[in-house]
Image: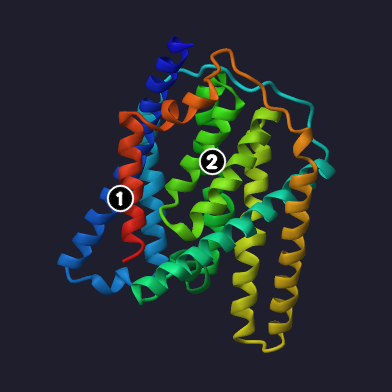
């Protein structure tokens, strides 16, 4: 058992280094480009929402992601999840409803927390994601939110991660996938729902072995949870009657959330959580996954992002 613990701690430290390198490289590239444009007297370009979005996404996926892969390739795949039969549309719809319930519940927690923090600090804290979605280019938002981000994030935080830690047990894999996915978002507005969604999607990947399911659900979640509202808000600026659609859509989300949480509670006893060949005892799971040098670096860079997004 101690041997499993040491092996897990070493593995997660190396994984933490990979995710730290991803976040640090993306942040460093973004700061360098930002500084260059400022020194060159091109600061006005940086205020363009479309440019800011392209800069952020470009640094993550063109700079951070390749460095992440270079480190990750040195960490062997331990055990891929067994492939199940293709899921029926009905089962996928149930998962989508549960995901929407988790997302809206987490979004409420994050929003309430930031309201409290804003009151304590006596200043508003901007939700940069909402600002970007509502004021940025609609085409770019659709491209990055509905296509690019779900593909990269599901590969990074489900397939590439879980295939390397599956032997430590489902509970460990779900915990790691959810927390790392929540932390990489770098702000409290998204942390709670990203963490919950990460855990639910990790469970789906563990049970099916097919990352295309989690990518598809991720795309649908981002579309329903973010883009539909943004499109309706923009439309309401031109067509006053669109305000009614916003109200109807908000009511639809509330019903979907209630249904999702209800399904999650009712189906909890049907969940299947398998022990791994190198299962970590529950009392040592947290320390094995998170209390190691690599993860310490990862948490340092993500906490820095949390702090920067609260300025």
- Say left or right for 239 vs 60: right
Residue 296: image location, x then y, percent? 32, 36
**Residue drawn at 81 percent across, 41 percent down:** 91
Residue 229: image location, x then y, percent? 63, 70
- Say left or right for 189 vs 236: left
Residue at numbered disc 2: 178
Dot 2: what SS? Answer: helix
Q: Quadrant of residue 272?
A: top right
Residue 166: image location, x then y, percent? 56, 22
The reply to whether residue 155 is visible in this rendering is no
Q: Is residue 146 above or below residue 139?
A: above
Image quarter where the C terminus lies is bottom left
Between discs 2 and 1, the one toward the N terminus: 1
Q: Residue furthest bottom?
A: 240
Disc number placed over residue 27 in the picture, else none:
1
**Residue drawn at 66 percent across, 37 percent down:** 212
Contact between marks 2 and 1 (CB within 8 A): the answer is no
Q: Quadrant of residue 72?
A: top left
Q: Is residue 165 above or below residue 241?
A: above
Dot 1: what SS? Answer: helix
C-alpha separation, residue under disc 2 versus residue under disc 1 = 22 Å
**Residue drawn at 49 percent across, 11 percent down:** 1
Q: Is residue 60 above or below residue 135?
A: above
Say how many tags the image has.
2
- In front here: 42 or 130? 130
């Amino acid at each position: 058992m101690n041997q499993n613990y040491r092996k897990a701690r070493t593995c997660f430290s190396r994984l933490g280094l990979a995710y730290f390198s991803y976040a640090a490289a993306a942040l460093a590239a973004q700061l360098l480009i930002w500084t260059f444009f400022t020194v060159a007297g091109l600061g006005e370009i940086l205020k363009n929402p479309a440019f800011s979005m392209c800069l952020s996404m470009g640094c993550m996926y063109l700079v951070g992601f390749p460095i992440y892969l270079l480190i990750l390739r040195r960490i062997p795949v331990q055990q891929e999840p067994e492939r199940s039969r293709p899921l029926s549309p009905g089962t996928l719809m149930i998962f989508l409803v549960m995901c929407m319930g988790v997302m809206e519940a987490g979004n409420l927690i994050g929003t309430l927390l930031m309201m409290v923090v804003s009151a304590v600090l006596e200043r508003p804290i901007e939700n940069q994601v909402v600002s970007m979605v509502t004021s940025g280019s609609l085409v770019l938002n659709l491209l990055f939110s509905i296509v690019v981000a779900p593909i990269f994030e599901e590969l990074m935080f489900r397939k590439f991660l879980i295939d390397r830690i599956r032997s430590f047990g489902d509970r460990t894999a779900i915990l790691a996938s959810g927390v790392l996915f929540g932390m990489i978002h770098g702000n409290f507005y998204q942390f709670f729902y990203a963490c919950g969604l990460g855990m639910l999607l990790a469970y789906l990947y563990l049970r099916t072995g097919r990352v295309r399911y989690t990518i598809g659900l991720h795309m649908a979640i981002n579309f329903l949870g973010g883009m539909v509202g943004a499109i309706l808000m923009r439309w309401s600026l031109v067509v006053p009657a669109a305000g009614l659609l916003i109200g109807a859509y908000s009511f639809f989300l509330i019903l979907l959330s209630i249904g999702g949480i209800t399904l999650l509670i009712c189906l909890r006893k049907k969940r299947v959580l398998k022990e791994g060949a190198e299962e970590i005892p529950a009392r040592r799971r947290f320390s094995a996954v998170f209390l190691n040098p690599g993860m310490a670096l990862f948490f340092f860079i993500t906490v820095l992002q949390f702090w920067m997004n609260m300025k």
